[in-house]
């Protein structure tokens, strides 16, 4: 009867071990599928298994200014508005037009000299009154420019707010990673001591399994925090210039 608790503990250990094995196999399947998808996206035909290195990239503080693709449309709109203003300016400026024409029409060679003619003309025009159309067109152009500036201001405000949110979340995540890393190191030391106690028969398998489960969950949480950090850095670099 005294061995029943030990047998139950051992069975519990086997069940926990089998559960971990199952999770490892499932994770391996997911890894192989994701690696195959990555090869397809990159156009890589090699189907061999490899161990991917952890991505390493930092915040890009480079300021791209007007070269940022998010601002291209506002730049194009500004050029179109400027062109519209130039067209209106040119339409209401004094203009000079000239023309020249020459021709030859004859069915007989002897009379060619009598059937040759040419003409020229010059036209000068000055706009005097257009029913305030010029002022109306300028007003429309000014309104388009104000609208463009408001959209640009709104976009920049949203971008600054998004950058501020990402940075705050990034700094909080980095602090969490530091705490989790220190906690993981302490847990590893505790596991080493617990292993010695287990071998000496001074600790139950159930308690040892519980410690292993806590360590595994802590490692998973730490990896998720590191993954979140990389995602935040990628989001920052995507919208920042």
Image (cartoon, rainbow, N blue to C red):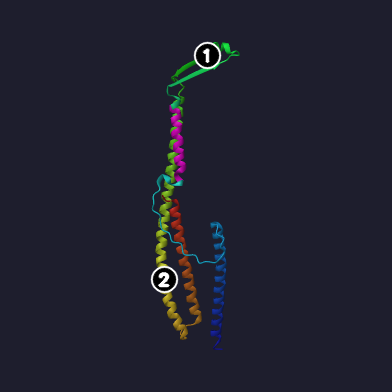
Whole-percent x and y of residue 137? 46, 29
Residue extent of the magenta highlight: 70-89
Task: Tell me the residue that label 2 is attached to.
Answer: 183
Indicate the quadrant containing the N terminus: top left, top right, bottom left or bottom right. bottom right
Secondary structure state at the residue bearing disc 2: helix
How many C-alpha atoms fall within 10 Å of the one at disc 1: few (<14), some, or many (≥20)?
Answer: few
Label count reads: 2
For the point 43% across and 42% down, which residue is it? Answer: 152
Q: Nearer the viewer, residue 211 or 240?
A: 240
For the point 49% across and 82% down, which residue is it? Answer: 204
Residue 181, compared with residue 152, is above or below; it is below
Q: Nearer the viewer, mark 1 or mark 2?
A: 1
| Chief SS of the magenta region | helix
Residue 168, compared with residue 17, is above or below; it is above
Question: Is residue 86 in the magenta section?
Answer: yes
Q: Which of marks 2 and 1 precedes in the sequence?
A: 1
Q: Nearer the viewer, residue 150 or 239?
A: 239
Task: Tell me the residue that label 1 is attached to.
Answer: 117
């Amino acid at each position: 009867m005294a061995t029943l608790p030990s047998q139950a503990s051992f069975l519990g250990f086997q069940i926990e071990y089998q559960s971990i094995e199952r999770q490892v196999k499932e994770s391996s399947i997911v890894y192989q599928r994701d690696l195959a998808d990555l090869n397809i996206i990159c156009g890589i035909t090699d189907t061999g298994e490899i161990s991917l290195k952890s991505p390493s990239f930092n915040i890009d503080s480079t300021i791209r200014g007007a070269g940022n693709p998010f601002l291209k449309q506002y730049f194009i709109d500004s050029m179109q508005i400027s062109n519209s203003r130039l067209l209106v300016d040119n339409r209401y400026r004094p203009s000079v037009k000239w023309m020249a024409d020459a021709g030859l029409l004859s069915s007989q060679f002897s009379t060619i000299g009598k059937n040759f003619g040419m003409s020229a003309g010059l036209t000068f025009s000055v706009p005097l009154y257009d029913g305030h159309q010029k002022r109306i067109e300028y007003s429309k152009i000014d309104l388009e420019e104000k609208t463009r500036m408001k959209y640009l201001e709104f976009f920049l405000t949203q971008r600054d707010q998004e950058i501020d949110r990402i940075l705050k979340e990034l700094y909080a995540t980095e602090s969490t990673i530091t705490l989790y890393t220190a906690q993981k190191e302490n847990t590893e030391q505790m596991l080493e001591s617990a292993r010695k106690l287990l071998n000496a028969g001074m600790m139950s398998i159930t308690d040892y399994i519980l410690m292993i489960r806590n360590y595994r969950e802590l490692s998973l949480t730490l990896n998720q925090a590191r993954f979140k950090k990389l995602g935040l850095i990628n989001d920052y670099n995507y919208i920042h210039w």
